[in-house]
């Protein structure tokens, strides 16, 4: 009897704990049920069998087509999945097969190419039935100048894994849904240009369009021919042919600075016709420029920098006065270096800042009128085509008597 009671009590306690756990989970899940919902469902293969180990991912996609993953789930052996509670709003659901056997599938089925359709996830919740389609495989090679290029990413859209080429340049993209796809070979950083199938073109307006991949076309060779990164390069030199170091060379907003050898190189990620000319600047030289031809993808140019700008002003130093500051003594204006060659100097002497009549030579004899006064001299340099320059000496001490 007691054993029966213990069994009964154990069952009751177990049931109570189970209910408590369920209530706890339910309470946590429904805590924000006024502003949340969930999506779940079952995924089957094209033959109707449950599709296990597929990945169901819930996204948001902004106006710039950037995706943000909200939640993801792996389908069970019976093909079912569940993506928890989410804030109410518009979402996108994608199911992918890591093996590539089935094609990546959006739910609901997109109404047009390239752009999946959103659905509203509300408190009403959603149960989706998703049928996968067999994935198509495409293969080919990526070459440059007829030679294979390894480690190039080949993509057929954002929903499909992008493989890299092997040492022979070969690749295979798996799990492509039948339809139109934009194929691209992306070498990343390096000497080659990202290339839309089948090859690089001179202008973006000429980029190859979307390609039809179906059961018939999938078997063809999808080969890419890469192009070298276009550039403009050359040397900046002066008129004597000597290289100019530290010159800045710009193609629109793309710039390079010359080294000691005067060499520059600018790699270009757009056709040249977007950037019509080079602009060259260097300290002490006039700006230079060079037109670049439209769609000119490889060009080496040599630019001749302009002569240094000639000076436009007379240069000189302040004069000084030699001689004793005594009545009857002769003072002399001593000038330093003045330029350029050919500059003419004129003199004017002052007594306490007032012009001394007739005192316009390089020397001046002190008179009784200068007694107890201070004397200065002003020197002016003039040359045709240049701005004149005037410099004033420091004053003497007060002129004394003999």
Image (tube, rainbow, N blue to C red):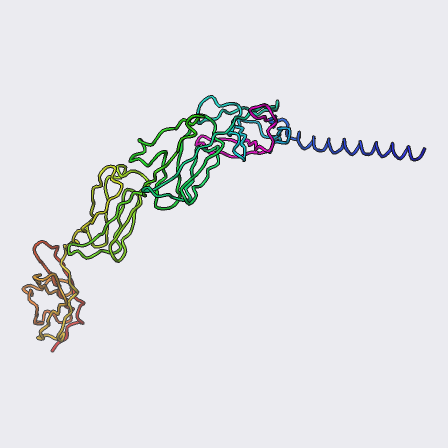
Percent across and percent down for residue 291 are 20, 41
Residue 227 appears left or right of 363: right
User: Which residue lies at the image location 82% right of the left edge and 34% below the top edge?
Assistant: 13
The stretch of residues the image draws in magenta is 43-72
Residue 189 visible in the current orientation: yes
Residue farthest left in this picture: 358
Total number of numbered discs in the rendering: 0
Q: Nearer the viewer, residue 220 or 206?
A: 220
* Vertical placement of residue 307 versus 209, above or below: below
Percent across and percent down for residue 37 are 61, 27
Say whether residue 45 is magenta: yes
Which quadrant: the N terminus? top right
Q: Nearer the viewer, residue 191 or 166?
A: 166
In the picture, residue 213 is in which quadrant?
top left
* Vertical placement of residue 87 versus 334, above or below: above
Residue 293 appears left or right of 402: right
Residue farthest right in this picture: 1
User: Which residue lies at the image location 29% right of the left edge and 49% below the top edge?
Assistant: 256
Q: Nearer the viewer, residue 183 or 102?
A: 102
Which quadrant: the C terminus? bottom left
Residue 121 appears left or right of 161: right
Percent across and percent down for residue 39 are 60, 27
Q: Nearer the viewer, residue 161 or 224?
A: 224
Say whether residue 234 is magenta: no
In the picture, residue 186 is in which quadrant?
top left
Percent across and percent down for residue 335 are 13, 68
Residue 37 visible in the current orientation: no
In the picture, residue 349 is in which quadrant?
bottom left
């Amino acid at each position: 009897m007691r054993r029966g009671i213990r069994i009964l009590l154990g069952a009751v306690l177990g049931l109570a704990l189970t209910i408590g756990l369920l209530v706890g989970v339910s309470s946590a899940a429904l805590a924000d049920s006024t502003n949340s919902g969930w999506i779940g469902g079952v995924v089957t293969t094209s033959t109707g069998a449950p599709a296990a180990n597929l990945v169901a991912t819930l996204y948001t996609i902004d106006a710039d087509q950037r995706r943000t993953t909200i939640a993801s789930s792996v389908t069970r052996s019976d093909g079912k999945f569940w993506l928890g509670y989410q804030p109410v709003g518009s979402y996108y659901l994608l199911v992918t097969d890591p093996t590539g056997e089935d094609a990546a599938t959006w739910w609901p089925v997109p109404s047009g190419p390239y752009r999946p359709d959103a659905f509203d996830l509300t408190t009403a919740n959603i149960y989706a039935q998703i049928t996968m389609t067999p994935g198509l495989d495409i293969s080919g090679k990526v070459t440059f100048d007829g030679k294979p290029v390894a480690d190039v990413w080949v993509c057929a859209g954002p929903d499909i894994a992008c493989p890299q080429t092997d040492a022979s340049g070969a690749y295979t993209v798996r799990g492509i849904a039948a339809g139109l796809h934009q194929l691209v070979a992306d070498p990343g950083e390096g000497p080659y240009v990202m290339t839309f199938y089948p090859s690089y073109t001179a202008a973006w307006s000429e980029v190859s369009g979307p390609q039809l991949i179906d059961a018939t076309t999938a078997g063809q060779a999808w080969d890419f021919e890469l192009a070298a990164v276009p550039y403009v390069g050359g040397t900046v030199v002066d008129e004597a042919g000597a290289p100019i170091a530290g010159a800045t060379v710009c193609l629109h907003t793309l710039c390079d600075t010359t080294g000691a050898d005067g060499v520059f190189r600018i790699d270009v990620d757009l056709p040249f016709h977007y950037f019509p000319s080079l602009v060259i600047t260097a300290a002490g030289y006039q700006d230079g420029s060079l037109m670049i031809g439209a769609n000119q993808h490889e060009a080496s140019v040599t630019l001749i920098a302009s002569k240094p700008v000639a000076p436009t002003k007379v240069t000189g130093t302040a004069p000084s006065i030699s001689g004793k500051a005594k009545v009857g003594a002769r003072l002399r204006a001593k000038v330093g270096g003045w330029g350029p060659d050919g500059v003419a100097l004129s003199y004017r002497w002052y007594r306490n800042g007032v012009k001394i009549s007739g005192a316009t030579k390089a020397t001046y004899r002190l008179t009784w009128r200068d007694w107890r006064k201070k004397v200065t001299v002003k020197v002016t340099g003039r040359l045709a085509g240049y701005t004149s320059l005037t410099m004033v000496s420091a004053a003497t001490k007060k002129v004394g008597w003999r």
